[in-house]
Image (cartoon, rainbow, N blue to C red):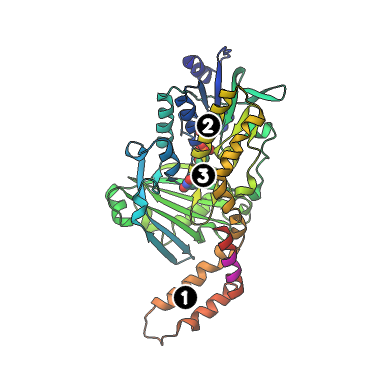
Amino acid sequence: MQDELQDIGKKGEVIVSDDRFDAIIVGAGLAGSTAALTLAKAGMEVLVIERGNWAGAKNVSGGRLYGHALEKILPGFAEEAPIERKITKERISLLSETAGTTIEYADESFRKPETASYSVLRSKFDKWLAEKAEAEGAMFVTGIHADEMIVKDGKVCGVKCGEEEMEADVVILADGVNSPLAQSLGMKKELAQAETAVGVKEVIGLEEKVIRDRFGLTENEGCAWMMAGYPSDGGIGGMCLYTNKESLSLALVLTTSYIGQSELSVPQLFERAKAHPVVAPLIEGGKLLEYSAHLVTEGGYNMIPTLYKDGVLLAGDAANMVINIAYTVRGMDFAIESGRLAAETVIKAKEKGDFSASTLSAYKQMLDNSFVLRDMQFHAKAPKLMEHKEIFTKYPQMAQEIFSEMYTIDGNPRRHLLKFAKPALKKAGGIFKLARIGLDANKAI
Ligand SMILES: Cc1cc2nc3c(=O)[nH]c(=O)nc-3n(C[C@H](O)[C@H](O)[C@H](O)COP(=O)(O)OP(=O)(O)OC[C@H]3O[C@@H](n4cnc5c(N)ncnc54)[C@H](O)[C@@H]3O)c2cc1C
């Protein structure tokens, strides 16, 4: 069967599949492969359809995986998975045109498996996870695009790939951010410009020792670094950098509605940010290994679509499960947990022999009680916080003015902090604006 399905991908021939699966999963990202692993472990017959040539071939992330969700399914996974580095240092910077103000936070507790986060390269990591699911008996077919849903009497009962129809009791859509398949079922709206950002990412090769020395790391430690201000040219967004073993992942994420407002294109903005005096020395001498671009949803909890219907469930990015809360971007742990919970729902539905919306509604209840929707709801006001443009425009400049005066010793008369901090704050919008942003930040993070 697998050979036949792979042949469809290679030659575009029509082969009618007589086999019926317990579940079909569209997309072998983290959500899809986790669902496949969970279902296969429970002895279910599961088919995963992936359009890329291998799981992970088309997947993009800034690069940090919070490990807790996968730890529940594969305890100690980091011992064998192709993780890059354990993140032990967090840095956040406000960049003006010529300066950077950075806070660093390092914590020993970040080393514990239950709280650890890891830099990962998706093309390796997703492949590994898919192989884990395959080892449990899940069937993966790659290089095949699922084009259409098969719906009979209002119930989803399979997918169409070209002329080939494949049927199952239930379909889990884990096909990522756009999910035209979920849109075709009326479960999800077409993404609006104001609700999305575009991420461009480079993986830049550097020697292992250079990375350690440049970022002050020991052998397996890593650094996650968010930078706001100059990189996004005043638009909502920022740059993130993650240290891998022998490379850096550097990404610029910019709200889609800003594109066109800047004189520079997104790739030009990215080049400009790479030349910033704080960034340039970090990547100096590096070799471009990979370039990718991807959409990311920005609306958070308010964008959660319909999560289940008769015979179908949405997981991961297909269900818009991403949050961007300025100091971190999260989507991978949501994808893993929602994939697991979608599979748990299907296992229970199989026991009942009922895949109706009423039975599948247990998925939403489980998500409501899980960290996925709890955390997303907790951070629901993050998009509103990001609307304060001062964070990306005036505050990096304000920080520069204050710290520049503190640290400039040139023989000129010294001034007390308030003498120079007050005018800098006034220029950035004043104390009331700062208090407003502080209050909104308190509600959002
Ligand atoms: C620039 C950027 C930075 C990010 N940084 C982070 C971060 O640091 N940490 C974090 O946790 N999250 C981050 N995220 C979010 C994170 O990448 C996503 O939330 C996560 O990848 C979602 O996983 P998924 O499995 O749901 O979807 P995906 O990883 O997108 O997987 C979907 C899969 O479906 C396949 N597919 C799609 N359509 C079809 C079809 N019709 N037929 C067959 N296959 C199909 C695709 O090829 C793909 O393999 C970032 C996202 C971006 C864009």
User: Within the magenta stretch, is there residue 27?
Assistant: no
Q: Position of residue 211 (x, y in %)?
A: 32, 51
Q: Look at the picture and state if 423 lies above or below 189.
A: below
Does label 3 or label 1 sit earlier along the sequence? 3
Q: Which residue is mark 2?
A: 344
Residue 404 location, quadrant: bottom left
| Residue labelled with disc 3 | 331
What type is the residue that disc 2 sits on? Glu
Residue drawn at (65%, 50%) of the image: 194
Farthest-out residue, front = 352
Q: State which quarter of the image contains the C terminus.
A: bottom right
CB atoms at circles 3 and 1 under 8 Å apart?
A: no
Identify the magenta region: 435-439
Judging from the image, what secondary structure is the residue with disc 1 in? helix
- The reply to whether residue 358 is in sight is yes
Q: Is residue 437 magenta?
A: yes
